Image (cartoon, rainbow, N blue to C red):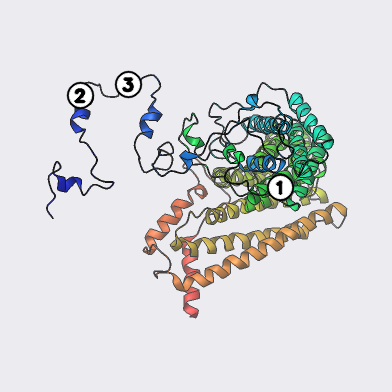
């Protein structure tokens, strides 16, 4: 195919968008020759962002400032702060503000309290809309301060950039609450105002939110929990009542939210065009957030470490927690003592007091010292105390890891599994040392048998969570599915055996029955999940080697890929382990299982 010359009319007619173009190649060549490599020229009122917005790069983030001839977003009029609004329109604005990630900066200072008609009194702007917008911005400021305490991750869990938009940082929270109180009082006495109750509910909700988030999460004040419950009750009232109708296309309320706001924000990283969620979705998100915060405060008041662990495992799988709830949870967890964390093992699973193992080792150490084995005495006591410290560290890490976003949770599981294996090995050796001279003490014999089993149970749980999280995040090729389901089924089978061994050693007293109840629930969950994984493996075996499981790779390549995924299960060159690692994948056992199933076909 012959291409016409660039300067010919035939070539210009083939250019998308018409032929009204001029060749500026020569101009660009001359300009670039006068510049040095890496040099950037700028001028007043024309920034790099302006230059980037001058052309379309075909990337949603980079092109958010480009204005196209038929772009409806660029034709949204500016919000008029003096335009009178009725209560239903103000209610609509307040509802949409909750759904807005970044709204326009409404010029509150320009609102003038002037009287107008009965249905659109201008006084509503100053006496109701202004306090609610102040409350909205102050709520954002209070939440931003909590999220930036360094407990969750900017860019992963939330966006910390303010885009040089003020959030009423210098306005005292008490002053905002006073303006909202005044708005509520004004509406209470404003009889005859259409849709007054609709607007009053939203003012009360904003006041409860400001009060709830004005307290520090680690203070655990009863007042804060009361404000959260009040906000949830008001939200449920709003959700069950008729919503405000959509404003007319000519209504000034439409201009309160600028769909092209990204073009006006000062950003470090370009943003995608912002779309507001539906109002139903916004209410659901807020309700989940309030439910989550209330639940965390309630369990913080009464829940044990075992209750916390069960809840965090559940929430990490369903991924319904917002960044604020996870941040608050982390604050509450960090306020706990090391003994509270160790209670998860010693009181709620073993069950024995956490300091019993120290007193046991101390007594045995004294006997060794009397017998002349001073060196062995010191090694035993220091070894047990070091085991306690490391066990507390990995349990603390487990609590905090479960409260992170799912990708980071999975990565942290892989990093800590080697530490769990080392602790299990050391605990096994120490318990053997203690068990021999203490066999005549029943409680001591039970402890030395149970503790390694409990640590093994936790390690197998983390392995299962790590592998299954990969399915949730869609990290695996289909050709890897048969092995992964088989592997999880094997791990769960061993965990079922471990839990049964633990249950057989528990006493029938109240503490033993409570621990047995927890372990039996865990046992049922493991048995159910094991059956599901084995069933999936059996269903996938006939598809191995077919186009249904892509990409199709030879057995050796699949084995190398799998072992690469399970690098965390292989000890480093500097490590030696006397304990057989049952969590390490066994490719030969997998191939044997596949061959047996195919032999039955």
Up-down relation of residue 558 to residue 279 (above or below): below
For mark 3, give the secondary structure: loop
Residue at the (20%, 33%) spot, across then down: 25
For mark 2, give the secondary structure: helix
Return the residue at label 2. 33
In this view, the residue in front, 147 or 470, is 147
Tell me, yes or no, whether the two marked residues, 2 and 3, touch with CB atoms within 8 Å: no
**Extreme top residue here?**
44
In this view, the residue in front, 322 or 142, is 142
Quick check: can you spot residue 396?
no
Quick check: can you spot residue 470?
yes
Q: CA distance from mark 1 to mark 3?
A: 50 Å
Q: Quadrant of residue 134?
A: top right
**Of callouts 2 and 3, which one flags the residue occurring earlier in the amino acid sequence?**
2
* Mark 2 Cα-neighbour bin, 10 Å: few <14, some 14–19, many ≥20: few
Return the residue at label 1. 287
Return the residue at label 3. 41
Q: Is residue 63 left or right of residue 380?
A: left
Up-down relation of residue 13 to residue 109 (above or below): below
For mark 1, give the secondary structure: helix
Q: Is residue 521 left or right of residue 423?
A: right
- Residue 2 placed where, x, y %? 11, 53
Up-down relation of residue 72 to residue 104 (above or below): below
Q: CA distance from mark 1 to mark 2?
A: 60 Å
Residue at the (66%, 21%) spot, across then down: 170
* Mark 3 Cα-neighbour bin, 10 Å: few <14, some 14–19, many ≥20: few
In this view, the residue in front, 502 or 57, is 57
**Of callouts 1 and 3, which one flags the residue occurring earlier in the amino acid sequence?**
3
């Amino acid at each position: 195919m012959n291409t016409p010359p660039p300067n010919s009319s035939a070539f210009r007619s083939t250019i998308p968008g018409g032929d009204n173009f001029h060749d500026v190649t020569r101009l660009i060549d001359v300009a670039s020759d006068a510049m040095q490599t890496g040099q950037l020229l700028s001028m007043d009122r024309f920034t790099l962002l302006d230059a980037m917005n001058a052309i379309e790069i075909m990337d949603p983030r980079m092109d958010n400032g480009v204005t196209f001839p038929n772009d409806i977003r660029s034709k949204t009029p500016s919000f008029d702060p003096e335009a009178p609004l009725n209560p239903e329109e103000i209610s609509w604005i307040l509802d949409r503000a909750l759904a807005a990630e970044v709204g326009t900066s409404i010029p509150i200072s320009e609102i003038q309290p002037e009287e107008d008609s009965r249905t659109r009194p201008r006084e509503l702007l100053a006496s109701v809309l202004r306090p609610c917008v102040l409350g909205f911005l102050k709520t954002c400021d209070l939440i931003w301060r909590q999220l930036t305490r360094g407990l969750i991750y900017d860019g992963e869990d939330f966006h910390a950039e303010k885009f040089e938009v003020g959030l009423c940082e210098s306005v005292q929270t008490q002053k905002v609450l006073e303006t909202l109180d005044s708005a509520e009082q004004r509406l209470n006495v404003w009889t005859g105002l259409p849709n007054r109750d609709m607007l009053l509910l939203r003012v009360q909700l904003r006041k409860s939110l400001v009060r709830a988030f004005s307290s520090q999460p680690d203070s655990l004040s009863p007042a804060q929990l009361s404000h959260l419950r009040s906000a949830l009750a008001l939200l449920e009232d709003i959700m069950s009542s008729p919503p405000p109708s959509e404003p007319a296309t000519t209504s000034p309320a439409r201009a309160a939210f600028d769909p092209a706001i990204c073009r006006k924000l000062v950003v470090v990283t370009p943003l995608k065009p912002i779309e507001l969620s539906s109002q139903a979705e916004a209410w659901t998100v807020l309700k989940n957030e309030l439910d989550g915060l209330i639940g965390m405060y309630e369990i913080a008041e009464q829940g044990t470490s075992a209750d916390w662990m069960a809840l965090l495992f559940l929430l990490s799988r369903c991924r319904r927690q917002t960044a604020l709830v996870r941040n608050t949870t982390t604050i509450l967890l960090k306020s706990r003592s090391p003994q509270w964390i160790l209670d998860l093992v010693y009181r709620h699973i073993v069950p024995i007091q956490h300091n019993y193992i120290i007193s046991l080792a101390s007594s045995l150490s004294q006997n060794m010292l009397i017998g002349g084995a001073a060196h062995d005495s010191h090694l035993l006591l220091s070894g047990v105390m070091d085991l306690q410290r490391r066990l507390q560290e990995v349990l603390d890490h487990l609590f905090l890891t479960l409260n992170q976003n799912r990708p980071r949770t999975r990565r942290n599981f892989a990093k800590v599994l080697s530490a769990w294996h080392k602790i299990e090995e050391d605990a096994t050796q120490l318990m053997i040392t203690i068990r021999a001279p203490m066999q005549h003490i029943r409680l001591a014999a039970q402890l030395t048998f149970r503790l390694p089993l409990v640590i093994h149970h936790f390690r197998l749980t983390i392995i299962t969570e790590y592998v299954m999280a990969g399915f949730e995040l869609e990290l695996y090729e289909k050709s890897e599915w048969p092995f992964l389901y088989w592997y999880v089924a094997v791990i769960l089978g061993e965990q079922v055996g471990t839990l049964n061994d633990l249950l057989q050693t528990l006493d029938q007293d109240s503490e033993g029955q409570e621990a047995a109840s927890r372990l039996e629930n865990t046992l049922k969950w493991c048995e159910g999940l094991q059956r599901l994984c084995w069933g999936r493996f059996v269903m996938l075996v006939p598809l191995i080697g077919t186009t249904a499981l892509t990409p199709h790779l030879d057995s050796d390549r699949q084995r190398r890929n799998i072992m690469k995924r399970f690098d965390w299960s292989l000890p480093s060159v500097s490590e030696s382990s006397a304990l057989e690692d049952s969590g390490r994948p066994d490719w030969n056992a997998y191939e044997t299982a596949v061959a047996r199933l195919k032999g039955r076909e």
